[in-house]
Amino acid sequence: MITSAKHLVFHGTFVLLFGLLLGASSYFFCVSMPLAAITGHRGLTRGKTMPENVVLFANIAGAWLSLVATLALVYAAAVSL
């Protein structure tokens, strides 16, 4: 994604922010997926134990960061036209 983002109209700090957002989103999902399998909790609602709540938080954080990175990519693509 970072290499294709270089062809868009991004400022240098915007490329860094885009990469950090996607990287952080990936790490949150990397925490939530195995932990969800271990706890048996999908992370769609609050759980009864702390690991289940961590799954929920990691899913929410990963989804929001991914959404912000996607909106940044769409904005850069629109500006590049």
Image (cartoon, rainbow, N blue to C red):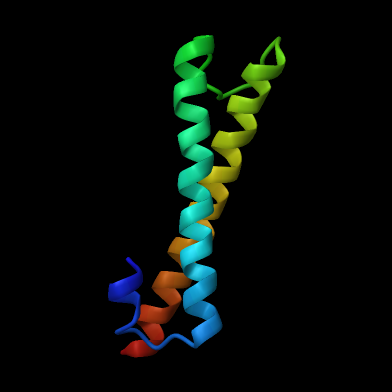
The quadrant of the image that shows the N terminus is: bottom left
The answer to which of 69 and 3 lies nearer the viewer is 3
From what the image shows, is residue 15 above or below residue 71? Answer: below
Q: Please give the name of the residue rendered at 30% of the width and 74% of the height, measured from the top-left corner.
A: 3
- In the image, residue 16 lies at what x, y percent? 51, 74
Left or right of residue 56, residue 2 in this image: left
Q: Please give the name of the residue rendered at 52% of the width and 21% of the height, measured from the top-left corner.
A: 35
Left or right of residue 50, residue 9 in this image: left
The quadrant of the image that shows the C terminus is: bottom left
Left or right of residue 44, residue 8 in this image: left
- In the image, residue 13 lies at what x, y percent? 55, 81
The answer to which of 79 and 41 lies nearer the viewer is 41
- In the image, residue 32 lies at what x, y percent? 52, 29
Number of numbered discs on residues? 0
Left or right of residue 16, residue 53 in this image: right
- In the image, residue 40 lies at what x, y percent? 49, 10
Question: Residue 53 is drawn in which quadrant?
Answer: top right
Q: Please give the name of the residue rendered at 70% of the width and 10% of the height, measured from the top-left corner.
A: 48
From what the image shows, is residue 37 above or below residue 8? Answer: above
